[in-house]
Image (tube, rainbow, N blue to C red):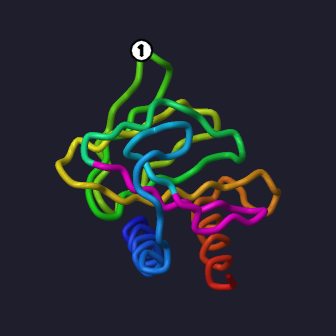
Amino acid sequence: MLKTFSMVVMIVALSCEPALTQQRGQGRGGNTGVSPSTIMDTPDVRVARVQIDAGAVRPSHSHNEGPFHMFIPITGPVEVFFGPEGKEERETVAPGQVHFFKSNTPHGFRNLGSTAVTFVEIFVKNTGRANNNPLQSLALALNALRNK
């Protein structure tokens, strides 16, 4: 089930890539080397494509717009760190793997590689229609992308 879920996410992300030009360089909040681009933003979900240059870091931050969000590397592995400052856990997330962050979990990411990496983030919002079921939330995101 998770393998199918990951494959669907990767196919969607890669099929959207040619249509999504983005500026490289300084991302949101002055994060040099982190270039986010919103793919879609609906009342239920927000999907962002992010490129992170070799060696770049997105410092710890959190989101409170919904119950969780999903982090999916597409072109290479990304190190994620999460948890309270000074006690962060670290995990390397491989292309096609999914990492879940619950709402308000401090987290950040780092590209330890020598080339830029692209990943997708899917943010589930507090609307009542999207819930804690990741497959239902993904279905909402895919439906919105299809109708875009």
Question: What is the x, y in percent for residue 78?
Answer: 31, 47
Q: State how many labels appear.
A: 1
State the predominant SS element of the stretch in magenta. strand
The answer to whether residue 139 is above or below residue 26 is: below
Quadrant of image for the N terminus: bottom left
Q: Label 1: which residue? A: 86
Tell me the residue at 68%/62% (across/down): 45
The answer to whether residue 98 is above or below residue 112 is: below
Question: What is the x, y in percent for residue 146?
Answer: 63, 84
Tell me the residue at 32%/40% (across/down): 56
Tell me the residue at 26%/58% (across/down): 76
Residue at the top extreme, as displayed = 86
Quadrant of image for the C terminus: bottom right
Compared across the picture, whether 116 is left or right of 4 comes to left
Residue type, mark 1 in image: Gly
The answer to whether residue 122 is above or below residue 78 is: below
| Image-quadrant location for residue 38 | bottom right
Question: What is the x, y in percent for residue 94?
Answer: 28, 55
| Image-quadrant location for residue 5 | bottom left
Residue at the right extreme, as displayed = 128
Q: SS for tag 1?
A: loop
What are the residue bounds of the magenta stretch?
37-53
Q: Nearer the viewer, residue 146 or 67?
A: 146
Residue 46 on the magenta span: yes
Tell me the residue at 36%/58% (across/down): 73
